[in-house]
Amino acid sequence: MSTDQLIESDPTHDGAGDESARRPGARRASSQRESDAVQFSDAVQFSDSLTAGHLPPFTAIGLLVVCVVGVFLVSQLAHSFSILSWVVISVIAYLALHYVVSRSVEGRRRAFDRFARDLVTLAFLLALVPLVSLIWETVSQGAARFDWQFFTKSMYGVIGDDGGAGHAVQGTLIVTAIATLISVPIGLLTAVYLVEYGRGKLASAITLLIDVMTGIPSIVAGLFAYALFVLVVGVANATMGITGAVALCVLMIPYIVRSSEEMLQLVPKSLREASYALGVPKWRTILKVVIPTALSGIVSGVVLGIARVIGETAPLLITAGFVDWKNPDPVNGAMATLPVFVYKQYMTPGVPQAPYYARAWTGALTLILIVMVLNLLGRLIAARFAPHTSRK
């Protein structure tokens, strides 16, 4: 009998040796499968804990309606209704009810997240209340005299319900234009110096001075400009349009310096280094590379700076004065401006008072519209002249 036949006929040889040889590998594979199954089960449970139990999208609106209606009915039954208490109690009830419902369905973490979101939304709505109230009151009160006559006629010889603010609008445009022509070159060149050349004590002193000028009251700027022109032309001739323009420059220059400096700092250094590598001098790099790249931000900052100073009343009341007729000459006599016109119409009305108040509200509405247009113009300029970074 051969050896193979003896092995096959041996009852004790049933492959146990081969199984014991394979057992460590099989044991490791089985252990790995069990570990993978446990990890998969844990992952599924964790995923379910994150995705299970969501509130419907309309839950917040539904709870708010329930709270508003419920508080209203309770206050009617108690005969103690007031709009302020109704709103406050409804908001508190909504915040509490929304948190309780969310916690019972979604858990503590999501409930707290919804509570924080409700608080942020409430803060946003509270910030909108004075703005909406101001716009609504100004539009409702000033729309009555918002006509062509208001923008073309002056108050010269006018008593009662007639006249307009044409002389004030003209003065505002002249004073603001002069202030812009003075402020933009000074502010832009100062920003270029601070970003490109400013080192040492002089740059630190200029930065400190700009910071101080940013926070000075507008009345101080008016007093400074008036005192300056008193020294130059005397007290009798110091009240004129150019004096008001200088006062606005004191307020406008720090804003332009800060906005232009931030825009120039955003220009990548690689653009400057590439220009220097081509042998271009520094002044030409600034003129042809740095400023054009930051032009959109600089122009939008200038426009927003104009919107910042165009409604100033205190400095113009001291420096430019007020007249009832049109004066297009900024260096000869007092000049009316729109903020001072609104102040005069409201604080020193004639008889009857209603036409003066109506003109004051219309002047305020005009100022709001001018500021709004300037802000929109600044955004459009920033979007139009922004550098294109995408490659075709």
Image (cartoon, rainbow, N blue to C red):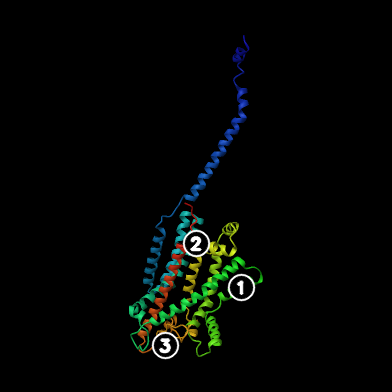
Q: Nearer the viewer, residue 125 or 389?
A: 389
Decide: few, some or many residues near mark 3? Use Cα within 10 Å; few <14, some 14-19, many ≥20: few
Look at the picture and state if 26 lies above or below 227: above
* Residue 21 at least partly seen: yes
Secondary structure at badge 2 equals helix
The answer to which of marks 1 and 3 sits earlier in the sequence is 1
In the current view of this chain or complex, which residue is farthest to the right?
Answer: 200
Question: Residue at label 3?
Answer: 348
Secondary structure at badge 1 equals helix
Quick check: 320 left or right of 215?
left
Amino acid of disc 2: Ala
Amino acid of disc 1: Ile
Q: Position of residue 118 (x, y in %)?
A: 46, 63
Q: Nearer the viewer, residue 155 or 284?
A: 284
Decide: few, some or many residues near mark 2? Use Cα within 10 Å; few <14, some 14-19, many ≥20: some
Residue at 60 percent across and 33 percent down: it is 28
Look at the picture and state if 305 lies above or below 359: above
Residue at 62 percent across and 30 percent down: it is 24
Count of labels in the image: 3
3D distance between C-alphas at marks 2 and 3: 49 Å
**Quarter of the image where the N terminus is located:** top right
For the residues carrying marks 1 and 2, which lies nearer the camera in this image?
A: 1
In the current view of this chain or complex, which residue is farthest to the front?
Answer: 279
Amino acid of disc 3: Thr
Look at the picture and state if 14 lies above or below 256: above
Quarter residue 10 falls in:
top right
Decide: few, some or many residues near mark 1? Use Cα within 10 Å; few <14, some 14-19, many ≥20: some
3D distance between C-alphas at marks 1 and 3: 42 Å
Question: Residue at label 2?
Answer: 116
